[in-house]
Image: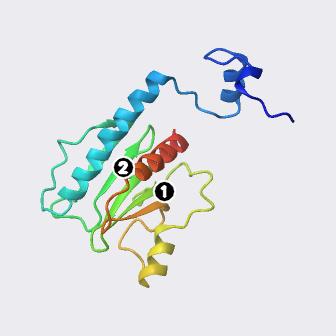
Amino acid sequence: GKELNPNDFEGGIGTSAFKLLKKEGFKIITKEQNIIEAKENNEFIKLIEKFIIQSKTNNLKTTTYNKQFRDLKVKVSFGQGRSARIPWVGLLKEPNTISKGIYPVLLLFKELNVLVLAYGTSETNKPEFKWSNIDFSNTINDWHSGEYGKSPDRYGSSYIKRIYDLDLDLDKEMIKQDLNEIVFEYQ
């Protein structure tokens, strides 16, 4: 019941304090890992900015996009054969796939000019896994119906982490924090 300060225990990888924190579910990040993650975050923000710009064109190519982010596979889609109304960027870990699984996803609702970071669930096949700790989140269907009085074209069963209004400047620090949280939960 006593609040500890750094002088009350020894810290560092392999110490009792770190072992206890890890046991309690905390992720221990070294200073070097922190620098690497910061660099990856900045590169991913550039990917998001490029994605938003390209979504306003008829260019459906995705070969120039990074294929990895924090040990997750990156999948990008602007549509097949024609531009999608809702292009997306998905982050995947095995055995999940876009057509069968759960995954963090950025969905760009072009006609609304909003980017949604969501706890994605596949539409094609029922996923084998479920997101935990999302009972507090609204589905995209709930949000879209409440705001616009109709169901969205797609992705209604996914759960919202955050909505970014693209009529405003993208808050890069907020999206970095949100990505860190959702990726940590997913991993």
Quadrant location of the N terminus in the rendered image: top right
What secondary structure is marked by label 1? loop
Q: Nearer the viewer, residue 137 or 80?
A: 137
User: Disc 1 and disc 2: Cα gap in Å?
Assistant: 17 Å
Residue 120, quarter of picture:
bottom left
- Asked if residue 47 shows in the view, the reply is yes
Residue drawn 44% across and 44% down?
A: 96
Asked whether, in this view, residue 41 is left or right of residue 33, the answer is left
Q: State the mark number for residue 126.
A: 1
Q: Nearer the viewer, residue 76 or 11?
A: 11
Q: Is residue 47 above or below residue 106?
A: above
What secondary structure is marked by label 2? strand
Residue drawn 29% across and 50% down?
A: 48
Q: Residue furthest bottom?
A: 149
Amino acid type of the residue that numbered disc 1 sits on in the rendered structure: Lys
Asked whether, in this view, residue 147 is left or right of residue 48, the answer is right
Residue drawn 37% across and 51% down?
A: 172
Residue drawn 41% across and 49% down?
A: 173
Amino acid type of the residue that numbered disc 2 sits on in the rendered structure: Gly
Q: Earlier in the sequence, mark 1 or mark 2?
A: 2
Q: State the mark number for residue 90.
A: 2
